[in-house]
Image (tube, grey):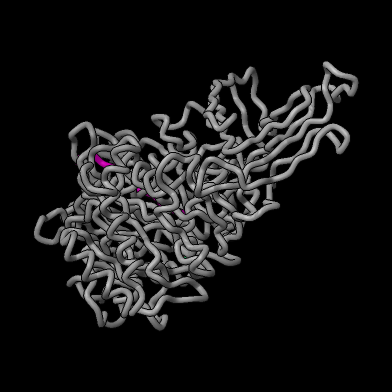
Amino acid sequence: LFVNTSEASAKEIPENLFGIFFEEINHAGAGGLWAELVSNRGFEAGGPNTPSNIDPWSIIGDDSSLIVSTERSSCFPRNKIVLRMEVLCDNEGTSICPAGGVGIYNPGFWGMTLATTNFKASHVSNWTKMEVLLQAQGTDAKSRLQLTTTRKGVIWFDQVSLMPTDTYKEHGFRSDLFEMLKDLKPGFIRFPGGCFVEGEWLRNAFRWKETVGPWEERPGHFGDVWQYWTDDGLGHFEFLQLAEDLGAAPVWVFNNGISHNDQVDTSNVLPFVQEILDGIEFARGDPQSKWGFLRAAMGHREPFDLKYVAVGNEDCGKKNYVGNYLKFYSAIKKAYPDIKIISNCDGSSKPLDHPADLYDYHIYTGANNMFSSASKFDQVSRNDPKAFVSEYAVNGNDAGKGSLLAALAEAGFVIGLERNCDAVEMASYAPLFVNTNDRNWNPDAIVFDSAQAYGTPSYWMQHFFRESNGATLLSSTLQANSSSSLIASAIVWQNSDNKKYLRIKVVNFGSDNVTLQIFIDGLELNSVPSFGLTKTELTSSNLMDENSFQMPKKVMPVKSSMEDAGGKVDIVLSPHSFTSFDLLM
Ligand code: AHR
């Protein structure tokens, strides 16, 4: 491998090249990153009419001790359903209640994990908010929230919440999952979907205005693509807050009047355009503005740093896409000239027929094709618009639920993106999360249930690129017999210790050991420098190895420090491996 450190052949890597894509899929948010433990907290999952679907709430007691029904008598105009519980037994009367009382319980999202931390439970009585701090005395992954009584009478419940107090800055993000995201040092976060943004039908698409304001006033909605209800606690505000907490640039994907099955004509799309202008005002507007005022009232007086928006998801080619897109484009550019607008149309093979700052590119494919797609952007135009590879992953048999093979092929592809960072501005793996109880899509980067989480090899693959945002890409060339199964890149970055490091990353996609000689500016790195060389390797004994709750660390990067051996060392790349070498410059 020949590495050239001259500035003339180097490229500046965009600050936001590697980021993450959050979609409300696989219960990624509801029952996932959003730490709310109660599922269907307002009893609205059946929609606005009664009887509503109270699932997964269940009843403790029988017909002789209580009657449970739903009514439209909430004090919240956007979510009228409440649960009415008429208790027939009474421990102070003749018909004694069963031991433990009667009532209702919520098992959360396939079990609530209560550990020795505090929880804030709140509910509404006589439509007064009531809040109590519960302290768990032990740990149990199959806990549930029970609301029981032994007194006769009628109680109405609405908007029942149970929130751990140890969420990140008390912002509501489940701490272990949040930390896994933070560890990736994402340059941006694209949200909230994906197909989730589009909906099968427009009436079920994500509408930001329904997801802001006090959580108990949000109506929630049924995401009809991934087929589950969300209370929308993780709403427009929380996504922006999440981006800020991660130090990532928010990339808002909005519905452009097009779902999977219906579309708004361009002549009627202006209300949709206004909704999006309002959403940008919510994020960036002055606290005196209508929507900026609401943001400030929600606790964030300063504007959020929203600089990227995407007009729809995978909608290019649909009848009204370009017409609708142009309406959004001109209105947003007029009001916010600095916002970068992302088109769904692929500009890599032919120039776009409409203006855009970035074009979206998605790739889900087999391992060999993913690895050879490393050269996909070698020949594309370096002019604007730049590519946003907002969804990439190996899928199908090569991937299973997250194999080493998939991660290696993706590593090769992502090195290709890094090498083409003058044509590609941003890239993210997809999907990010899966709650193992609702696997709508395989594979995913982070697997969790209510109690635990682990990264798939594709999650760990992304760790190798954590230092790349804003770094300098050096020109590097591989000369090898088996070069078709090798790909490499070299970057220089400044660490928090203010020292400069060189990182070389190499994927060996072949099944043989490869001895690597590294030449830096023509000089062979033929012994380990006295300050050492850190090697990090992602490999495993079997190409299809995966991580699991039983073996969460089976395939993950292993770091080793090669100290000065005083002589020539062979740098050997294991078969089927992804390796990085860090040297102090
Ligand atoms: O990442 C899963 C889905 O794949 C996304 O919702 C969609 O954009 C793509 O088809």
Residue closest to the eye, 187 or 71: 71
What residue lies at 34% left-to-right and 59% top-to-bottom? 427
Q: Residue at x 61, y 55 (%)?
A: 47
Number of labelled discs? Answer: 0
Q: Eyeballing the image, is 527 above or below 266?
A: above
Segment colored magenta? 577-585
What secondary structure is the stretch in magenta mostly built from? Answer: strand
Q: Quadrant of the C terminus?
A: top left
Pick the residue in front: 56 or 394. 56
Dividing the picture into quadrants, the one containing residue 549 is: top right
Locate residue 113, reporting x and y percent: 62, 32
Q: Position of residue 209 (x, y in %)?
A: 40, 53
Q: Residue 261, percent across and down?
A: 52, 75
Q: Is residue 582 magenta?
A: yes
Quadrant into which the N terminus falls: bottom left
Identified at 24% across, 33% down, the residue is: 531
